[in-house]
Amino acid sequence: MIDLSVSNLVKEFEVGNRILDGLTFQVDTGERVGLLGPNGCGKTTLLRILTGEVDCDEGEVMVAPGKRLGLISQIPVYPAGYTVEDVLDTAFAPLHEMERELSRLAEQMGAGENPALMARYDKLTAAFQAGGGYETETNKNKVCNGLSISAEMRGRPFDKLSGGEKTRVNLGRLILEDTDILLLDEPTNHLDLRATEWLEEYLERFKGTVLTVSHDRYFLDKVVDRVIEIQNGKAEFYSGNYSFYAVEKERRYEEKLKQYEKEQAKIEQLEKAAQQLRIWAYSGNDKVFKRAQSMEKRIERMRVTDRPRKERKMEVRFGEREFRGDEVLTIKGLEKGFAGRTLFSDVNLEVAGGERIALLGDNGTGKSTLIKILMGEEQPDQGKLRLGPTVKIGYLPQIIHFAHPERNLVDTMIYDLDCTAQTARNRLASFKFRGEDVFKPVSALSGGEQSRLRLCMLMDAQINLLILDEPTNHLDIQSREWIEEAVEEYEGNLLFVSHDRYFIDRFATRIWMLEDGHITDFKGTYQEYLSARQRQKQLAAQPAAPKAEEPKKEKPKRPGGTKNLEKEVTAAERAVAKAEEQMYDLEQQIEQAASDYLKLQELYEQREALEEEILKLYGTWETLSAQLEEARG
């Protein structure tokens, strides 16, 4: 059954500039579809057309009858004084109305028996129960915990929240409404890692239809099973998740390029033949002349295929300063709090040359505050921080500020870098700022464009410690890949805050997890960190050993005594050693496949399975070793 159908959709905001140009697609019930395309291609406009917030110029939109449709980015206006709790409760409006009617019916029935009232009461009670009327508080608490909507936040006025907080609350409200068709516009932009993972798990269980715009490549891989890419106002279809899309898109490009080159070779061959025929036709042979004309018409018909184009990569590289010495950063006894609340305390860390560190943690734990302390923008309450003598920092903050936002891009570059207008334009062009765009005031740029401009200005600085605070936020996938290419080329020290798991996975060689006011320092990749945490959870979940005061149960004697036990312990040790060797080989393969995303995913799954196997083998070895010790004792 079709839930959504879009036919020949056209939308034009400026005359002659069609953002959607005959867009056609359909989404079936239960499908999870990712809507991709660069910023400005019309993805958000399409979602607003689907909800009726924006009208299309031409075309037709059909939503299956009786299906409820909700858009995350479309935040309704609520009455003055509404708290977050009130907003969440609007999800249960039909149930609250049933509750009020049940109360009225109960009062009326108290006055005397009435079969019609009893029948209505019974029917309404069944509907109330089926609709989850008795679980509203439980469900609300689950969603709030999952999306990090705290009890304190639930009591705050909704209109006083930040844009990101409003989006998060609205996402919670739509989930509680149990909407049939979820339209998600960058749902993970304002979620921390834990809330993003919770949303992914929720969507796995969700029985409805999902159409999502997202630049989070991990999220797309976990959630979607089909991709629709908007290109030049039309739809391109890919039957798989993001990883499939990335590989298939490249394959299609190569195929189109081969076809184009084949056609060009054929055209060249025909042009030579036509030229020769014209030479022969000079002798007065009309048939040969007509053949030449026919061949030239055929050549013109073949010239319809344009050369397939790829977005050019940004030609970017950080200016690097040579690093001397082992010490990059030393932190001792660092503590910081606000308004009586301690963000973190007793932080002791040392950073050596060449390390790439991801600073992770939930929203509000103090990650950006720690970065600001490193940058000297905030002062700690206690503790010391020392940078190595040859360290020079380059910093890309989460929220970009320009001293003179009224200046255009060229003037901003000239004043900041003390360069010529031509140099400024060349630099801007390498960061995809071209033509008339370079004369826009900085204040007219989007958040993503401002990040790109700041990065462009940062590239010229001679640095050896690069600090990035949410560098990929608000950027489309293409822009994220540009930044990743620049970071890949950079060989200095890197410290970054990010919720982009693809970015974390690609660059982190060390993890600082900030939670409960302390930093857990893990030396290893993000996947290794996740595996270690999973191991800890599994060990913690194992049943505790019997208490000493409990009577010991008689254990059956093992045939063969300690000799058999010794053999079993030795065999268990060998099995563990063999599995550890396999893990080592697998780690080597993972390092070698660093640039092959699909292969990496496969290897990570193998590693996860092997880690579980190793855990079981260690458990067997520990049990047998304890039995052997007891038998010898």
Image (spheres, helix red, strand yellow):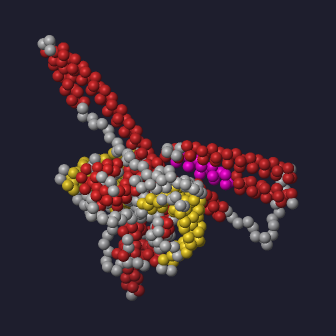
| Horizontal and vertical percent position of residue 49 | 27, 58
Residue 385 lies, in percent from the top left, at 54, 68
Please indicate, yes or no, whether residue 98 appears anywhere in the rendered image: no
Quarter-wise, where is residue 535 in the image?
bottom right
* Residue 402 % position (x, y): 34, 64
Residue at the spot x=40%, y=75% of the render? 84
Q: Is residue 290 left or right of residue 242?
A: left
- Residue at 50 percent across and 50 percent down: it is 491
From which residue to which does the magenta span run? 601-616
Q: Residue furthest bottom?
A: 111
Residue 346: image quadrant is bottom right
Please say whether residue 88 is visible from this viewpoint.
yes
User: At x 50% / y 52%, what residue is drawn?
Assistant: 322
Measured as percent of width and height from the top left, residue 73 is found at: 34, 64
67 within the magenta span: no
Q: Nearer the viewer, residue 326 or 536?
A: 326
372 and 506: which is toward the camera:
372
Magenta-colored stretch includes residue 604: yes
Q: Which quadrant: the C terminus?
A: bottom right
Residue 172 drawn above or below residue 615: below
Quadrant assignment, res 56 = bottom left
